[in-house]
Amino acid sequence: MYNPKEDSYLIQKHIKEFCNKNSIVLDMGTGSGILAGEAAKYAKHVEAVDIDNEVIKELRCKLNVNKAIVHNSTHSSSKARSKIKFLQSNLFSSLNKKTKFDLIIFNPPYIPTKKQETRFVDLDGGKNGAEIIEKFLKQAKQFLKRDGKILLLTSSLNKNIESLFKKYNYTYLALDEEKFFFEKLYVWVLESR
């Protein structure tokens, strides 16, 4: 399970801006569930997916046993938690193709790796760090409502990320950034053209 770090917190603080009581939200690669929990505070329904079935089992258990995922909610914790549906999925593979989302949140694996390195699915962004991001961008449009938006986190380690946005015909705006000693993290809002 991916433990929340600076990247999770950077994207988390922007979720409220893009949710309302009627929003249907997808948290792609949910990891710790922190972003799904944040969205559930404001949205009507949240689907949280992850490639790792053990992560999904653990999050379902947390959802049923305690209040660890959703806290400091303006709603009652049980009401907010009941809005989240956890599902094992490799990107969009297990989602109903008819389901459309107002907001898709994705804090992807974005660390560039080499084939000979140990590969951790929660960190491994492939050779340039953007392989998973590109697969996501290629499929995401068909799951967005007409005015739907994507909140996406990337790193300065991901080269030519804006060219990928253009390649898959998204409009994009950098909402936020944070500098660390070896990289800069960015939160983007994307819309389908």
Image: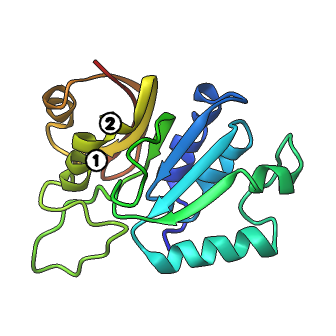
Residue 116 image-quadrant placement: bottom left
Which residue type does callout 2 highlight? Gln
Which residue type does callout 1 highlight? Phe
Q: Secondary structure at mark 1?
A: helix
Q: Position of residue 30 (x, y in %)?
A: 50, 59
Q: Residue at x 52, y 75 (%)?
A: 55
Q: Position of residue 1 (x, y in %)?
A: 50, 74
Between disc 2 and disc 1, the foreground one is 2
Pick the front one: 120 or 181: 120
Q: Position of residue 71 (x, y in %)?
A: 80, 54
Q: Residue furthest front?
A: 98
Pick the front one: 92 or 161: 92
Q: Residue at x 57, y 65 (%)?
A: 32
Q: Which residue is mark 2?
A: 142
Q: Residues within 10 Å of mark 2 (few under 14, many from 20)?
A: some
Q: Residues within 10 Å of mark 1 (few under 14, many from 20)?
A: some
Q: Is residue 11 above or below residue 48?
A: above
**Mark linked to residue 29:** none
Q: Is residue 142 above or below residue 92?
A: above
Q: Secondary structure at mark 2?
A: helix
Horizontal side of 55 relative to 171 (left or right) equals: right
Pick the front one: 87 or 117: 87
Q: Residue at x 86, y 40 (%)?
A: 74
Residue 167 image-quadrant placement: top left
The answer to whether residue 163 of the structure is visible from this angle is yes
Q: Residue at x 56, y 41 (%)?
A: 25
Q: Is residue 71 above or below residue 17?
A: below
**Disc nearer the start of the sequence (2/1):** 1
Report the Cα–Cα distance between label 2 and label 1.
11 Å
Quadrant containing the C terminus in the rendered view? top left
Q: Which residue is mark 1?
A: 136
Horizontal side of 61 relative to 100 (left or right) equals: right
